[in-house]
């Protein structure tokens, strides 16, 4: 099942047949409109971001932001690039600052990696790296349900890309 593949595996495997509803990251390579991609990160920027966080990033996330950066669409679904160095586009750096401003109890163990709806953010659990959960902006931690929306970062990207491109 493609949704359970690690991003590194999906990037190195042949394209999947989209007639069966599966889609791998090779689809991003076939897009004619590359303007949806923002903030491709180099190794130095990834290392700077990890130093800022005080922890390493999951390999899947590092591969995606190094190859594609972020994905910006007209819908509410967006994947954030790192935002290192600082950028004006919505990014992980921007979202960390914004959610920390909205919620003084925003957990250090969550990393906003995208949006799923208006004022709803997809956040990767960093302790340990794993699931992607929904965070609603402006709600206190004790009011959050932290609904699991993907089993890992690669699965979140795959699910979102299906919504975007199928």
Image (tube, rainbow, N blue to C red):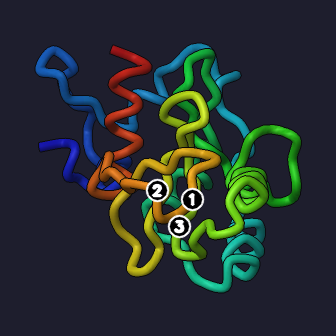
Do the residues under discs 2 and 1 have CB atoms within 8 angstroms? yes
Q: In the figure, residue 132 lies in which quadrant?
A: bottom left
Q: What residue is at 58 percent from the left and 48 percent from the top?
A: 67
Pointer 1 residue: 140
Q: Does residue 41 appear in this view?
A: no
Give residue 117's position: percent from left, percent from top. Answer: 51, 29
Element under disc 1: loop
Q: In the figure, residue 71 lies in which quadrant?
A: top right
Q: Which dot, 1 or 3, sits closer to the camera?
A: 1
**The N terminus, quarter of image:** top left
Q: Earlier in the sequence, mark 1 or mark 3?
A: 3
User: What separation in Å lies between label 2 and label 1 (alpha carbons)?
Assistant: 5 Å
Q: Earlier in the sequence, mark 3 or mark 2?
A: 3
Element under disc 2: helix
Q: What residue is at 80 percent from the left and 38 percent from the top?
A: 89
Pointer 2 residue: 143
Element under disc 3: strand
User: What separation in Å lies between label 3 and label 2 (alpha carbons)?
Assistant: 16 Å
Q: What residue is at 60 percent from the left and 75 percent from the top?
A: 108
Pointer 3 residue: 110
């Amino acid at each position: 099942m493609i949704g359970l593949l690690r991003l590194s595996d999906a990037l190195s495997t042949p394209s999947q047949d989209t007639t069966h509803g599966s889609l791998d990251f090779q689809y991003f390579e076939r897009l004619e409109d590359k303007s949806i991609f923002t903030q491709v990160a180099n190794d130095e920027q990834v290392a700077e971001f990890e130093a800022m966080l005080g922890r390493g990033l999951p390999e899947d996330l590092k591969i995606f932001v190094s190859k594609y950066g972020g994905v910006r669409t007209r819908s509410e679904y967006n994947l954030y690039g790192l935002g290192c160095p600082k950028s004006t586009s919505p990014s992980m750096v921007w979202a960390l600052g914004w959610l920390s401003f909205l919620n003084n109890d925003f957990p250090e163990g969550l990393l906003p990696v995208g949006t799923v709806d208006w004022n709803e953010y997809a956040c990767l659990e960093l302790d340990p790296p794993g699931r992607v959960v929904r965070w609603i902006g402006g709600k206190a931690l004790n009011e959050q349900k932290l609904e699991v929306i993907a089993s890992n970062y690669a699965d979140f990207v795959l699910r979102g890309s299906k919504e975007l491109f199928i």
